[in-house]
Image: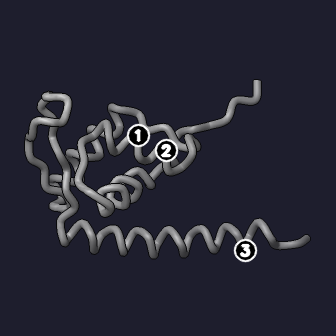
Amino acid sequence: MNETNTDVIQGTLDMLILKTLSLEPMHGFGIARRIEQTTQNVFKVNPGSLLTALQRLERNGWLNAEWRVTENSRRAKIYRLTPTGKKQLENETTDWQRRTAAISRLLKAEA
């Protein structure tokens, strides 16, 4: 069976969340949907993994969160990137670019 893997690459979920929230504050479901839409469903975000990551990012001071009533009249925790989170996103983006460039060089290497 040749199923396409849509799991988020280990260690990148934090970066994807930070990038998504750099665009605008949103709730968890919105974050997951935005990641899936932006990656054209290449990555699917597991709700349990997302919740754990959001809690960790909030504890690290990279996100602020507050409860609000949504347009559907439901209560949702809205997450917002902090200045420290913005700096972390810059650091993770630089590291990601360095790693992907290295992998690309390796894949292009000829025997």
Q: Residue at x 13, y 49 (%)?
A: 65
Q: Secondary structure at mark 3?
A: helix
Above/below status of 51 relative to 88:
above
Secondary structure under badge 2?
A: helix
Q: Which residue is mark 1?
A: 33
Up the image or down, 82 lies above or below 9; here it is below
Q: Which mark is residue 56?
A: none
Image point (28%, 74%), residue name = 87
| Label 1 or label 3, whichever comes before in sequence order | 1
The C terminus lies in quadrant: bottom right
* Residue 64 on image: x %, y %: 13, 55
Q: Are marks 1 and 2 in contact (CB under 8 Å)?
A: yes
User: How far apart are the alpha carbons under marks 3 and 2?
Assistant: 29 Å
Give yes or no for contact between labels 1 and 3 (Cβ–Cβ under 8 Å). Answer: no
Query: Residue 47, image x and y in percent?
Result: 35, 32
Residue under pointer 3? 105
Camera-near label (1 vs 3) is 1
Q: Amino acid at mark 2?
A: Gln
The quadrant in which residue 30 appears is top left
Per the image, the residue denoted by label 2 is 37
Q: Amino acid at mark 1?
A: Arg
Quote the CA–CA distance across marks 1 and 3. 32 Å
**Residue drawn 50% across the image and 50% down it:** 38
The Cα–Cα distance between marks 1 and 2, rounded to whole angstroms, is: 6 Å
**Mark 3 residue type:** Arg
